[in-house]
Amino acid sequence: MGLEERIIFSSDELIRNVEKALDRLKALRYDPKYRERLGDGFCDRFLDWEEDIRRRKDEPFTIAVVGDFKRGKSTFINALLGREVLTTDVTTETVTLNYLGYGQESTQAVLEGGRRIRLQPEELKKEKLEAIIKEAGEPVEKLVLKRPCELLKDVTIVDTPGLGDTLKKFDDMVEQCLLQADAVIYMYFVMAPLSQTEQLFLKTAVLPQKFTSLFLVGNRADVLDSRESFEEMEEFLRERAAGVFPEGRNYVISALDELCRKLGKSRPNDELESVLEERFQELEQDILNVIAEKKDFAVPDRMQRMFGAMLAEADQEFEALEASLSMSGAQAREAYQAMAGEREHQAEELAGARETLQSLMDDMSREAWGWMSDFLRRLEGQLGALGGVEAEDIQKHLSFYIADMLKEALNACLDFHRERLFDEMSDISGNLMKSLGRAQEDYSFRFELDNRMWTKGDNLGFGVSLVSQMGFLGNLAYLLGSGAAGALRSREIKNQKGELLKQVADQFPELRQSVKEALSQAYGRLKTAALEQLTEHYEEKIRKTEAQVELSMEISRKEEQEKEAIREVLAQTREMFREMRQLVIIAG
C-alpha cells in the first residue's frame, strides 16, 4: 500500500480539498482569455458545474427512495415519518419527484418552467392535483414539502416516481436524483421480488454510483399468512438479493402495517404484527445509524461524485477541441462537405437498424404468445384437478389467482425478451438501453366470478393448494405462496362446484383473447420505446458530428497565430483540470 492510500482525511479537510479544486474554475469566470479562446459555451458549462457542486455542499444528507410503480414507496416514507405526508392516491399523470425537508409546514409544486404554486395539504390528492396541473398549463416537475418532523432535521428524503416506459420523462430525473443522493432505499414487492428488469436497473443505475449505503427493502409482507411463511419468504429473498448485492442486507417489512401501528389504526395482519413491527424497527434503526455515522462524510462523498462527472465531461470537451485544432482548413472543408453524405449514411443505417429491431420485436411477440398459449392450454386442461378444492374457495379466489398467474407469466416473457433486446442493442450503443425494462407491466384481464371479500392469507393459501394439486408452474408457486399452504379454512357449503367450474371453462375463450390483447399492447410499448431510443441514439450521433465539424470549420478560419494561442490556453486548461483531478483523487 502506497503512502497516499494510507493518508486519512477528516470530513472538513475533504471538503476543503474539493473547494480548492473548484476555486481553480474561477479563472474561467474572471480571466477573459478563456472565453476568447475556448468560447462562452465551454466556460458556462463548467461554471454551472461549479455552482451545482457548491450548492450541494449546503444541502443535508439525502436519501432517495426508489423502485417500480406501486411498490409502496410513499407509504414507506409516511411510516418512517409517523404521519401521512405523501398521498398514495396517484396515477402516472400526477406522479412527481417529492422532496421532503424540515421546516414550517408548507407544500409547493414546482412547474417545469420554474414557476411555483403553493398547495394546501388536501390538494395533493389525485383529483385536485390533476385539476391544478391542467389549469397551470404545464407539467409539475417536483413537489417540495416542508414538515416539522424530527427525522427531517438531519435528512432530506426524495420520493421518486415509479420507473418504467409510461414514466419515461421522469427516468432521467430519477438518475440525476441518484447521482446527488447520499443513500438509496430500493423497494420491491415481496411476492414479485427483484425481477430481471429491476436487477438491470440496480446494476446499471444504482450500484455503479457506489453509494455510502444501499438498502434493499421487500415491502407488503403483510400479505403472508403466518410467521412460518414469513420466515421462509425472508430466507428466500435474502438469497435472491445476495445475487444482486452480496455485501448488502435485505429487509422484509410492511410499510402499511407500521404506518397503521404508529397512527393507532387497525393493522392489516394480526398474526404477523410482532414480527412486522420488529423488522421495520430494525430497518428504521439502521437508517438512523447511517444518517448519524455518514452525514458528516456525505457532503464530501457527494461533491466528489459530482466532481467526477464534471471531469469526465471535461475530457470529452478537450478531445473535441484538440481534434479540431489538428485539422487543416482543407480537411475541415472536406469534412463539412462530407456532412450531407454522412447524414444520408446515418439515415440509411437507422432505417436498417429500425427494420432489424422491428423484425426482432415481432419475433419476440410471436414467441411470447406461443408460450402464453401453451400456458393457457395447460391451465384450462387442469381445471378438472380442482375436485379437492372447496367451492367457496373457487368462488372467492380462482379468478384472482389465475389473473395473478397470467401477470407473472407475461412479466416473465417480458423480462426474458428485455434481456435479449438489451444484448442485441448493446452492440449499437452501450448506453442505449439504460431505460428499457425498468418496470413490470400491469394488466387488466376480462375474467371474473361472483366474488366476495376474503380473509387475510386465503388467496395465497388457495394459490399454493391449487398449484400442488394441478402440478404445474413449479417455482412460481413459491413466489405466490411461500409456505402459505394450509391456510384454507374448513367450510360447510352447498355443492356449487360444477356450476362454478363451468363458468370458468365458458370464459376461457374470452380470457385467451384478453391475454392476447394484453401481450400485444405490452410488446407494442416495448417496441415503441426501443425504436424511440434507437432513433435518439442516431440523431445524437449526427448532432455530435455536426457540432464537431462546425467547431473545426470555425477554428480552421483562424490564423495560425490565433490557433497557437488556443492551443496554449487549452494546454493551460488541461493542466488546471489535471491539478483539480489530483486534489479530488487524493481527497478520495
Image (cartoon, rainbow, N blue to C red):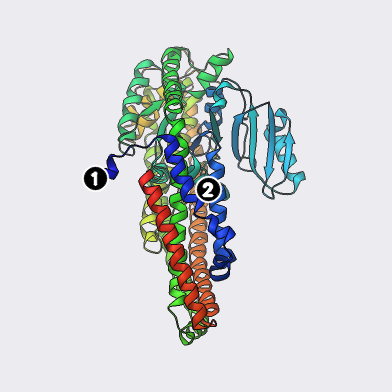
205 vs 36, left or right, is: left
3 vs 75, left or right, is: left
Three-letter amino acid code at the position of disc 2: Asp
Residues packed near mark 1 inside 10 Å, few (<14), some (14 to 19) or many (20 plus) = few
Residues packed near mark 2 inside 10 Å, few (<14), some (14 to 19) or many (20 plus) = many
Extreme-right residue of the structure: 135
268 vs 377, left or right, is: right
Quarter residue 483 falls in: top left
Placement of 326 over or under 453, stated as above or below: below
Is residue 432 visible to us here? no
SS at badge 2: helix
Residue assigned mark 1: 2
**Which one is nearer the viewer's eye here, 125 or 548?**
548
Which residue occupies 37% across, 21% down? 230
Residue assigned mark 2: 171
In the rendered image, residue 487, in percent from the top left (x then y), is placed at: 40, 17
SS at badge 1: loop
In the rendered image, residue 302, in percent from the top left (x then y), is placed at: 46, 41
Q: Quadrant of the C terminus?
A: top left
**Closer mark to the observer between disc 2 and disc 1:** 1
Which residue occupies 46% across, 25% down? 394
Which residue occupies 69% across, 36% down? 108
